[in-house]
Amino acid sequence: GMTTYYVANNSADKSGVSLAGFKFTLTGTAADGSSVSMSATTDASGTARFIDVPYGSGYALKEVLTTAQKAIWEALSDQSVTVSDATLDASPYEYILKEFVNNPKSGTITITKELPSDSTSAKSGFSFTVTSISTTGGYAYTATGTTSEDGRLSFSNVPYGTYSIKENLTSAQAKIWKGKSAESVTVSASTEDVTYRLENEPKTGPVTVVKTSEDGTVSGFSFTLSGTKAAGGSVSITK
């Protein structure tokens, strides 16, 4: 006999994936010329067992995804299986082991950092974290990256689902720029390539001028405040 073993994804950082309910078929011609057609479905451990398979070569082992599974997982190629004394003796187990590892259907999230048009500050060096809120395959996904000189940051191979995007301002950046609340985006078959644009506003504060004079006349005087913003760019305000 033989056993096939199905693993949806065995990466440690991809938790929460259900391995149950995946169907496999084994078809072909046995060594004695008889036709073989068998099916098995994975249990909670991801194992689908084919018992008492007649000796034969060139069996086609095929994963049969349901419509719902096709919307989540990339299809895999068939595998060829030979059941014989030689293949069973060569296996480290008491059965023949075949692994199928599906990748989730995925897309790209691209973040474009924007600054005020008069700002001369660099768009590079801004950190963002993308975290899954819910994914179609049950993945727990999180990734962090930093913008390049053009202000862009891309996360590829992001499984279909809904994600929060959070900007991680450094202490130095937080002294200059106002923070933004986390926002959500969705990656799906219809929106595989998502672009998220974020513009920070510079922090501002009040400057108060108190005019005094010996004769008590304090109204009608004009003042100009000029200089360079911490965010880059010039300031010229007249009141």
Image: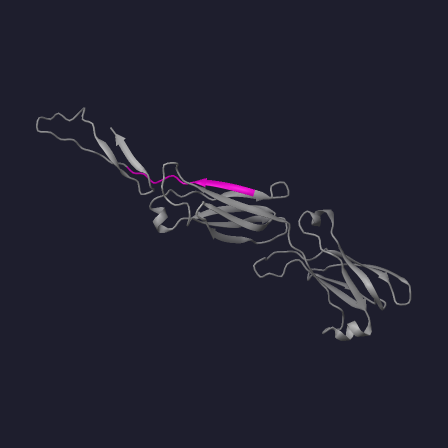
Q: Position of residue 138 (x, y in %)?
A: 62, 52
Residue shown at the point (36%, 41%) measured from the top left: 120
Q: Position of residue 89 (x, y in %)?
A: 77, 75
Which quarter of the rendered picture does the N terminus lie within?
bottom right
Q: Position of residue 28 (x, y in %)?
A: 85, 60
Residue shown at the point (76%, 58%) measured from the top left: 78
Viewer-proximal residue among 113 and 181:
113
Which quarter of the rendered picture does the C terminus lie within?
top left
Q: Quadrant of residue 117?
A: top left
Looking at this view, name the residue that lies furthest to the bottom.
Answer: 89
Viewer-proximal residue among 22 and 62:
62
For residue 68: magenta? no
Compared to residue 123, the image places residue 82 above or below, namely: below
Residue shown at the point (70%, 57%) measured from the top left: 20
Q: Which residues are magenta?
A: 194-205
Compared to residue 212, the image places residue 146 above or below, namely: below
Looking at this view, name the residue that lies furthest to the front.
Answer: 149
Q: Position of residue 106 (x, y in %)?
A: 61, 49
Q: Quadrant of residue 88?
A: bottom right
